[in-house]
Amino acid sequence: MSSDETTSQPLRYYGQRDVWGLGQLREGWQAKELLYSFFLRDLLIRYRQVFVGVLWVLIQPLMSTLIFLALFFVLGANRTESGEVTSTWGYAPIILVGMLLWQMVNNSLRDATGSLVNYRHVVTKIYFPRMLLPLSSLLCAVFDMLVGSVLILPVCYFSGVTIHWNTALLALIAASWLVVFCFGCILWLSALNAHYRDVGYALPFVLQIGMFVSPVVYGTEKIRNLLSPWLLVVYESNPVAATISLARYGLFGSPLPSILGLATALIVTLGIVVSGLAWFQRANQWIADRI
Amino acid sequence: MKPMVPSRKTTIHVESVCKRFRLGSGSEYSRLTEVIASSAKNWIQRKLWYSTSDVIIDERRQNDERFEGNEFWALRDVSFSVAHGEVVGVVGHNGAGKSTLLKILSRIVTPTSGRVGVRGRVGSLLEVGTGFHPELTGRENIFLNGAILGLKRSEIKKRFEQIVEFAEISPFLDTPVKRYSSGMTVRLGFSVAAHLQPDVLIIDEVLSVGDQAFQRKCMGKATELGSEGRTVLVVSHNLAAISNMCSRALLIDAGKLAMDGVPSQVIEKYLHSMNSIDGLVEWGEHEAPQSTAVRLRRIAVGGTVSDTPTPQVDIDREIELMVEYDVIQADAVNCVQIQLRDETGVFVFSSANAPSMNSGNDTTFGRPLQQGRYRTICRVPANFLNDSRYVVSVFLGPEVGQPSIACDSVLTFVVHDTGAMRREYLGSWYGPVIRPRLDWSTQLVG
């Protein structure tokens, strides 16, 4: 009989604050089945009425890579400073890696920001670890990135770029780092958007700027010559810039960002994740009242 | 009753819980702070007062100690504990804080101060279709809801058949929930909440949505859960349901726990607190709801109201509903409208003293009135309403449907079955809102 089970369980209190929000991480971990359900549902809803289905995940980064490649060709970016003409195709894998990582950032931030608000009828009617909603958007974006990364091999093959397999693991580390950074960002954005809807309106604009501020469609070689060393550190302290450069270094031996730049990017990432957890925990207290 | 130290049997332990909401302040949406304030205000208006007019909000605000400047105390120092296996009913007026309490218990809303302890899993059903995603099918929603409750897929699968059978929705399992009728959504919601075996089940008002048969089924299920050692908390305006299925009841009044005890006694106190126990509501000159033209003074109900208002009316007696008001602006035009609902919120009728709705004669309608006290009486025929409790709302204004004074749920009365209509018919009358005596005849025609 269940009554014995019930009395053996502890009386759990809530209503008190857990400042650093570590409790919510544990709670989120305990609800990983629910996270899986949310993730599956997001995936289902997304691909339910789509004809080519998962192919979209491949078409999107491929098309944008081709478009920027064509743009470079038209602008003559395939000329080095000394005027030699290099193959435009050599840029393809560089842009593709940038695109895959960037679209993960873009899609996770875009979808996660609205996640709590879009499910407010659920959020205000039933309790579950709310972190799971933005987290599930992030998972979807990571899933897309992983599927999309199968493009790297054929694109490298066609453009004649060799992959540095001995340092390729760095690219994986860079991608994971970027995912952690996005996790911190979506904690901030989703709860902020529950409060101030302007966040949702401002975000596409910020993302558009972010794409050009980060080396998504260009390599960092020219940037290095343009910026003074201090400005370069500022530029590289953007975790998106740092991780994309790191991934390209790992895969193709593109120039490694400065150690100082990487260190500041790491500190920025940690700062955003820790403050994001604390903020989300606080927001959790009022979310149902104000969403 | 003071909060006690939780024992081994305590499943819910509420410790001096308070909840404060911030209200809006004039200007809308000038970023940050204003957005918070106005959304809280909207929330309060939507959740606590439904769609009452501004007049009534201001009127309540004056007499309500829960308002403190820009803040509203939805709950104040509420403490109680519930042992496992108890089925507890929560009663109170609209806006008393019942729903806020349930939201705090189900963890959706965090209390401003105090804390809540719960043993085991909490299943809550706070509104029609609670927690359902409209785009997903019934089947997917069952799994999602189960996952939200913290169950494994295998556990949900085990109970899947039972849930579908209880909810009577098997033909629509693969239809998105947005296409369900509200009855179907409630049935599924209740079924999921009840069958996924939460240790604590919290139900708000949803029982009043389904049909009679399903309501009874739900009550049976809730009682059964209680006997299985699970704890059930129900908010309902259906007092009969509360007294039938609950072993204990709480009365929430103006954000405070006003009483905790046996359902019959709590219900009695609740009905007393409906400020119309004498079948009469009266206002002094300064506190009365008023517009520029009229000031409401008295609302009364009874057999012959002019002598003795009473909230207890026999089914075979004519019922008089009386409204008394002062016309304070010369040549004002005034119309009186009355709406009647039963205790579950079913709209019984709406009528006004306009000629089209009046079988008698009211010469004041549509005419400019001289200043002074007026009394309008509406007579509801005998043997028309059923044996039940009715809630009266009164509206005054220059035209029908354009009230400048709105008094929602201002007064209640009970129609008692004296047995006059029962002599030949032995079945149950439970169900219909009206029970008119109609003109029947049978003739041998060939």
Image: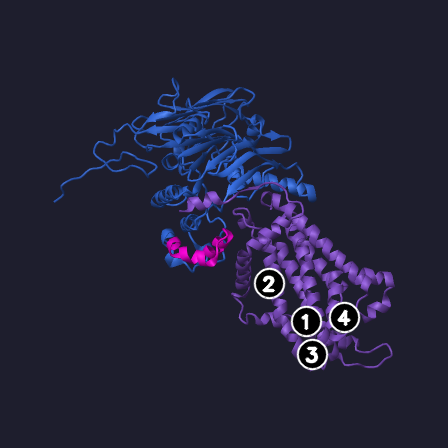
Boundaries of the magenta span: B140-164
Residue B149 included in the magenta stretch of the image: yes
Q: Name the residue nearer the viewer: B172 or B353.
A: B172
- Nearest to viewer (mark 4 / mark 3): 3
Residue B51 in view (yes/no): no
Would you name the residue on which mark 2 appears? A140
Q: The numbered mark 4 sits on a residue in which chain? A: A
Kind of residue at disc 3: Cys
Nearest the viewer among B9 and A148 is B9
- Tell me the kind of residue under disc 1: Ser
The reply to whether callout 2 and callout 4 are in contact (CB within 8 Å) is no
Q: Position of residue A240 (x, y in %)?
A: 73, 63
Residue at the disc numbered 1? A64
**Secondary element at tag 3:** helix
> Residues under labels 4 and 3: Cα distance?
17 Å
From mark 4 to mark 1, how far is it between C-alphas?
13 Å
Q: Is residue A236 above or below residue B383?
A: below
Q: CA distance from mark 2 to mark 4?
A: 26 Å
Chain letter for the purple colouring in the rendering: A
Question: Disc 3 designates what residue?
Answer: A156
Q: Label 4: few (<14), some or many (≥20) within 10 Å? A: some
Of residues B162 and B45, the one drawn nearer to the viewer in this rendering: B162
Which one is closest to the eye, mark 2 or mark 4? 2
Query: Which of marks 2 and 3 precedes in the sequence?
Result: 2
- Say which chain is blue: B
